Structure formats: C-alpha cells, structure tokens
Image: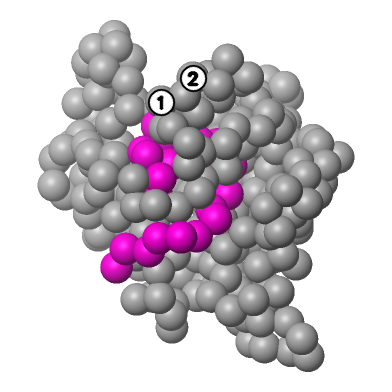
Amino acid sequence: MSFSGKTIVIAGGTSGIGMSLASRFTSLGNVVIILGRDDRKGKLTEAQLGKNSRFLQCDVSDHQAVERVFQEIDTEYSGFDLAVNNAGITTPYSPVADVAAHDWEQNISINLSGVFHCMKHQIPVLQRKPGGAIVNVSSCAGVVPLARQAPYVSSKAAVNALTQVAALEYAFEGGNSHPVRINAIAPGPTLGGMNTAERLAANPANTEKKRNATAMRRFAEPKEIVEAVEWLLSERASYVTGTILNVDGGYAAGKLP
C-alpha cells in the first residue's frame, strides 16, 4: 500500500492528523510540502520532519494566498503527485439562533472555502500526469449531524458534496488531461489535534459522550486515520473515487437510513 518518491502537498499539516500524515509520508521517502497559517508551528514541524519536508505559510481561506503558494510549488517542484486537504477549525458550540456570525463565517471560510481554493489549484497540476489523487479530510459530523454545531457540521457536509462533485468532473481522461481521483475521509473522534489530552481532561463528561457515540467505545489513534488516507492515495484504491470513507469506529452505523 505504501508509496515513495512522490511529492505530496498537505494543507493543514502542522498538528493532529495532518502532522501524522506528514510524518508518515516523509518516513516513506516522499517529499512533503506543508501549508499552514502559523509560521512558528510550521517551522517547528519542518525541523522535526527533516529534509524531506517544506513548510509554506498560507491561509487557505485567502484565495489569492492559495493561488500564490501553488504557483510557488509548481515553479520550485515542477508540480506534485498527491494532495491532502486537512486544514480545519471548530468554534464554540451553540444552537443555531445563538451562533455568532463570525463563527459561522470562519468555519465556512476555512473548512469549506479552504478546500475549494486548494482543489481549484491542485486539480490542473495533478491532471498533467497519471496517478493524481486528492483526499479531503471531512468529519463524521458531516455524515451524521450533531446538535449545537451548525457551522462545523454544515461546512463538513458541504466538503463531502464538493468532493463528490469534483470526483464526477475529473474521473475520466480528456484530451491531454489525466483523471484525478478525489475522495474524502470522515474520521470519528480522534486523539490529538482538536482532542488533546488536556482538552479531553478538562471536560470529562463531553469526552465520555464522544467515546460512547462510537460503536467501538474509543477514540481513534491518529495512525488509524493515516492508514485510511494512505490507502485512498495509493494505487490500491485505483478504482475508488467520489467516496466518503467513514473511519469512525462505527459512529455512523445505525444512524443512517
């Protein structure tokens, strides 16, 4: 299932699932280009991962910044082979009528528009040679809605729809363009990132609620999400596109019609 010698772009790769992906892919001998907003965290990540990594500061909600950074990548690396769109946030939970406009706009601009901005510039590059693939990191909350999380749930459900629309549009070869496989994963509660040990300990009741929402009664280890992304990017999944892969410990089981 593993691959090496590839150039891989990870948007949102300085913590959580994104950093776990970057660590895995560099360890296999791939060059990993990490995009993120926080320059300090990015430089630390780059130093930790070593010579096969490169951090470029970029706010994915800013379409002009995304265009510039992908032009830089294309110029310096003559393109890339694979991409993962993982940048995302969540904001305080509240009912719809109490959601702050800023919280709504921030979730949509980063979680949804950020994926759109990145794919807009990833797809033309990936079409230039065979084997191109994109994985968008969604959430189980985008598959089975949760109360009091309208901004986050809406953004992730829209990422799933955007993934499938793009997959339909770029699944076949046309002219000089190669097909690009485009999928998403919908992780369940996963350790690290938004679920740090400190954050989980600070709200034990909510932690227990998250754990019990899964059929397996536990949080995912980051490596379990990484392995699913790795499979979707690999040639082992060569006939898979437009799929929203639940990697959720059974969270969605029994909740969908």
Mark yes or no: residue 70 visible: no
Q: Residue 230 occupies which quadrant of the picture?
A: bottom left
Q: Nearer the viewer, residue 138 or 21?
A: 21
Q: Distance of mark 2 from mark 1, alpha carbons? A: 6 Å
**In the figure, is residue 14 to the left or right of 247?**
right
Residue lying at 57% horizontally and 63% vertically, measured from the top left:
81
- Residue 11: x and y in percent read 58, 42
Residue that extends furthest to the front in the rendered view of this protein: 51
Residue 142 forms part of the magenta stretch:
no
Q: Nearer the viewer, residue 55 or 111?
A: 55
| Rendered image: mark on residue 106 | none
- Helix, strand or loop at label 2? It is helix
Q: Which residue is mark 2?
A: 44
- In x, y percent, where is residue 78? 71, 59
Color theme of the render: one colour
From the viewer's perspective, is residue 118 above or below residue 236?
above
The numbered mark at residue 48 is 1
Question: Per the image, is 6 magenta?
Answer: yes
**In-image side of 60 versus 160 (left or right):** right
- Percent across and percent down for residue 39 are 63, 19
Q: Are marks 2 and 1 in contact (CB under 8 Å)?
A: yes
Q: Is residue 158 left or right of residue 63?
A: left
| Camera-nearest residue between 167 and 125 | 125
Kind of residue sitting beneath label 1? Gln
The N terminus lies in quadrant? bottom left
Q: Which residues are magenta?
A: 1-26
SS type, badge 1: helix
Q: Amino acid at mark 2?
A: Leu
Residue 102 vs 186, above or below: the answer is above
Residue depicted at 46% across the width and 70% down the height: 243
Residue drawn at (37%, 39%), measured in percent from left and top?
A: 23
How many C-alpha atoms fall within 10 Å of the one at disc 1: few (<14), some, or many (≥20)? few
